[in-house]
């Protein structure tokens, strides 16, 4: 039997941390502990976001830019994350199931993932120039490693008895992979995809800070140059909300496509 307090707790717990953070923010700004130019109050940031999303006649340069910036950033995310998934998943499966592939890639991958993304930025600018291709390259690089490593770990952790049981039932090759190996390692695969998606947003901002004309990261960079801390904070809020929505969409698509993903906890 469900406890009477269970349903309210399920609603309140996910928003408890954001509400706490909002309360601390309001206390610091409205209480006069920090100057407005360093920490604008919530209503100022809310007003800025309203203008950014809907626009108003005679408003500042950011008025109504939300749709264009969001579409530009999401397109870069889709391309970079899609490339990382297309590379990371099959290589992770091969590395998890075939020892020679794991030995071939382990040292290279471990060394490359230790290099900070900011180190790749100068090379990316030289190779691809300012704009779309540099941002996609950085996103792909960032998202590849968690997808690859988690897929490899998930596939390698599948018990041999389970694989042999599938083989005894007549499964082999792609059928064994699709019906036994991938479902058994789905929790790791899902975790890698979610981590990769989160890193995609972080490196999206890095790529867009290089001078692209549109995008959420570009807006934050422009606002910083103009001293618009309210717009910087508004951009952070927008990226956080869009990232959350994309994470939920990814979870929903995987659960719709794979029965095994429905058993994975968030």
Image (spheres, helix red, strand yellow):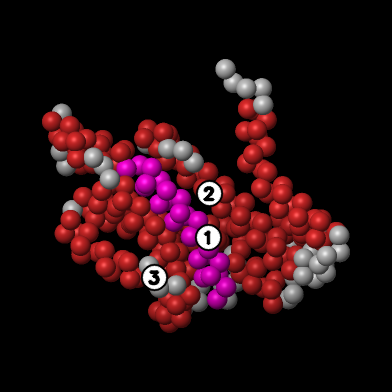
Disc 1 is placed on an element classified as helix
The image shows residue 49, relative to residue 18, as above or below, that is below
Image coordinates for residue 207, horizontal then vertical, percent: 51, 70
Q: Which residue is mark 2?
A: 246
Q: Which residue is mark 3?
A: 114
Q: Is residue 111 magenta?
A: no
The residue that appears at 81% across and 67% down in the rendered structure is 34
State how many labels appear: 3
- The Cα–Cα distance between marks 3 and 2, rounded to whole angstroms, is 26 Å
Disc 3 is placed on an element classified as loop
The residue that appears at 76% across and 55% down in the rendered structure is 24
Q: In the rendered image, is residue 44 in sight?
A: no
The answer to whether residue 246 is left or right of residue 23 is left
Q: Which residues are magenta?
A: 185-210
Query: Is the residue marked by circle 3 packed among few (<14), some (14-19), or many (20+) residues within 10 Å?
Result: few
The residue that appears at 43% across and 76% down in the rendered structure is 120
Q: Is residue 191 magenta?
A: yes
């Amino acid at each position: 039997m469900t406890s009477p307090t269970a349903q309210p707790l399920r609603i309140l717990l996910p928003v408890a941390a954001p509400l706490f953070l909002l309360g601390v923010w309001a206390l610091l700004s409205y209480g006069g502990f920090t100057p407005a130019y360093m920490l604008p109050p919530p209503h100022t940031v809310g007003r800025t976001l309203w203008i950014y999303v809907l626009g108003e006649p005679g408003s500042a340069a950011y008025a109504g830019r939300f749709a264009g910036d969001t579409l530009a950033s999401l397109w870069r995310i889709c391309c970079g994350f899609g490339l990382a998934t297309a590379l990371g998943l099959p290589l992770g499966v091969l590395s998890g199931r075939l020892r020679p592939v794991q030995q071939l890639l382990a040292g290279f991958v471990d060394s490359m993932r230790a290099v900070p993304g900011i180190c790749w930025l100068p090379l990316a600018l030289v190779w691809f120039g300012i704009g779309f291709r540099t941002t996609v390259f950085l996103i792909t690089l960032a998202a590849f490693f968690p997808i690859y490593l988690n897929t490899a770990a998930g596939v390698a952790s599948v018990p041999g008895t389970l694989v042999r049981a599938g083989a005894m039932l007549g499964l082999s090759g792609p059928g064994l992979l699709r019906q036994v190996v991938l479902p058994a390692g789905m929790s790791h695969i899902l975790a890698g995809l979610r981590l990769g998606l989160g890193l995609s947003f972080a490196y999206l901002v890095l790529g867009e800070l290089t001078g692209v004309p549109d995008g959420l990261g570009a807006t934050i960079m422009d606002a910083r140059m103009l001293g618009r801390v309210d717009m910087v904070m508004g951009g952070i809020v927008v990226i956080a909300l869009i990232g959350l929505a994309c994470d939920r969409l990814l979870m929903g698509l995987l659960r719709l496509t794979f029965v095994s993903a429905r058993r994975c906890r968030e």
